[in-house]
Amino acid sequence: MNLLNKVTGDFRRLLLATLFFGASAGVMASTLNNYLATVHGLDAGHRGWLELPRELPGFLIFVVMGLLLTRLREGRIAAVGMVFTAAGILGLGFFTPHMALMVAWVVIWSLGDHIIFAVDGPLGLKLAKRGGEGRRLGQLGGARNLGTILGVSAVWLLAKFTGDRYDLFYIVGATCALAAGFFYFRLKLGREDPPSRRLVYRREYRLFYAISALFGIRKQIFLVFGSWVLVSLHGVPVSTIALLYFIASALGVLLRPLLGDVIDWLGERVVLAVDEIMLVVVCLVYAFAGDFLPGPWALRLLYAAYILDHILFALRVARTTYLKKIAVDPADITPTISLGITIDHAVAMTLPILSGWVWERYGHQWVFMMAAAIAVVGFFICLRIKVPQTSNE
C-alpha cells in the first residue's frame, strides 16, 4: 500500500510538473516571434539564423546529459533544466540591452527545455506498467497540451488588458518553469536506481537512431515550412495561426492519451509506419492543395493538414516506448534518448538551409516532394522494427 501511495504521489507530481512546463512553453511559443521582431527588430533573415544557436543545446544535449547523469538522477536533472529555462526567460524579459546578450538568454532558455526533452520520457516510463507505456506517456502529453493552452490563454488575457507587456508575459513563463522545477525536484522515483551510463552507443539501437533522424526531418517540416506555406503563400494572419495552434492543442488534451493506448494496442512498428504514411499525405497537401482546389477550399485543407500534423506529433512517444522494449540495460534509456535528440538536432540545424535553397530555386512544391520521398523511406525503415515478446523492466 505504501508503494502504491508513493507511485500515485509521484505520478501526481509528474503530471503537475509537466502541466507547468507546458504552460511555460505556451508562453514562449505564443510570444517569442513577436518579441524578437518588435523589441529587437529582427527580420526574417536574422530570425532564421537565430535557429542555429537556439537549436545548439539540442545538438549538444548528449554531452550535457552525460555530465549531469554522473551526479544526478532524472528528477533532479529536470529540476535543474527548469532553473535554466526560468533564468533564460527572465533574462529575455529584463536583461537584454544588446543583441549578443539576447542570443545568450535564448541559448540558456533552450538548454533548459532540451534537458526536459531528454528526461521526460524516462520519467514517464518509470511510472508505467508493462504494456501500458504508451498510455502513461500519452497522459503526460495530454497534461503538457493542457498546460500549453493555459499559458497561451494567460498571454491572451494579459495582452488584452495590458497590451504587449513582455516583462509580464515572461514573469508568468518563468514562474511556471520554477513551479515545474519544484514538482520535478519532489519526485521520489529513481533516487535509489544505479547511475545511468554517461555515453551509450549500441548497434542494437540503430533503428532508434534512424527514427530519431526521421523525427528531426518531420519537426522542421512542421515547425518551419508547414506554417510558412500558410503565412507566405496564403497570407494567413498571426491570429489565425494562433487559433489553429489552440485547436490542435485542445484536441491533443483529449487525443494524446487515446493515441498512447493505440501505441500499446497496435505496437510501435505499425504506429510509426502509419505515421510516415500520414506524413506523406500532409506533405502532398502542403505541396499541391493550392494548385488543384479553389482558394477557400485549399486553405481549409491546409488548415486541416496543419492541425493533423500537430496531433500526430503525439506519436513520437512510440520511439521512447520502443527503446524501453529493446533496451539491453535500463540504464541505457536516458543517455540513448539524449543521443537521439542530438541526432534529431543535427538534422534540424541543417535541413532548413537546404530546404530554403530548394524553395527559392525551384518552388515550395519540391520541398514537400522531397519530404514525402524521405517519409516513404522512413515507412520502410519503420517496418523493420521488431519488439521482443518479453519487455525489459
Image (cartoon, rainbow, N blue to C red):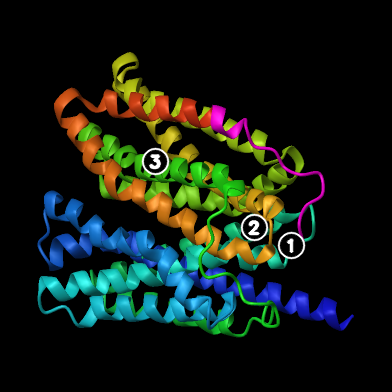
Give the distance between the C-alpha atoms of the residues marked 3 and 1, in whole angstroms: 29 Å
Specify the segment rendered in magenta.
Answer: 380-393
**Could you tell me residue 207's position as x and y percent?**
56, 42
Q: Which residue is mark 3?
A: 217
Work out whether 381 lies above or below 183: above
Asked if residue 180 can be seen in this view, the reply is: no
Give the distance between the C-alpha atoms of the residues marked 2 and 3, in whole angstroms: 22 Å
Work out whether 279 lies above or below 78: above
For the point 21% across and 65% down, the residue is 35
Type of residue at label 2? Leu
Q: In the visual, does 149 lie left or right of 231?
A: right
**Could you tell me residue 254's position as x and y percent?**
62, 51
For the point 53% across and 83% down, the residue is 71
Q: Which residue is mark 1?
A: 128
The front one of 339 and 189 is: 339
Q: Secondary structure at mark 2?
A: helix
The front one of 54 and 311 is: 54
Residue 97 occupies quadrant: bottom left
User: Do tag 1 and tag 2 residues touch (Cβ < 8 Å)?
Assistant: yes
Main secondary structure along the magenta-highlighted residues: loop
Q: Is residue 152 magenta?
A: no
For the point 71% across and 55% down, the residue is 133
Asked if residue 336 can be seen in this view, the reply is: yes
Q: Which residue is mark 2?
A: 137
Q: Secondary structure at mark 3?
A: helix
For the point 30% across and 80% down, the residue is 90
Type of residue at label 1? Ala
- Quadrant of the frame with the N terminus: bottom right
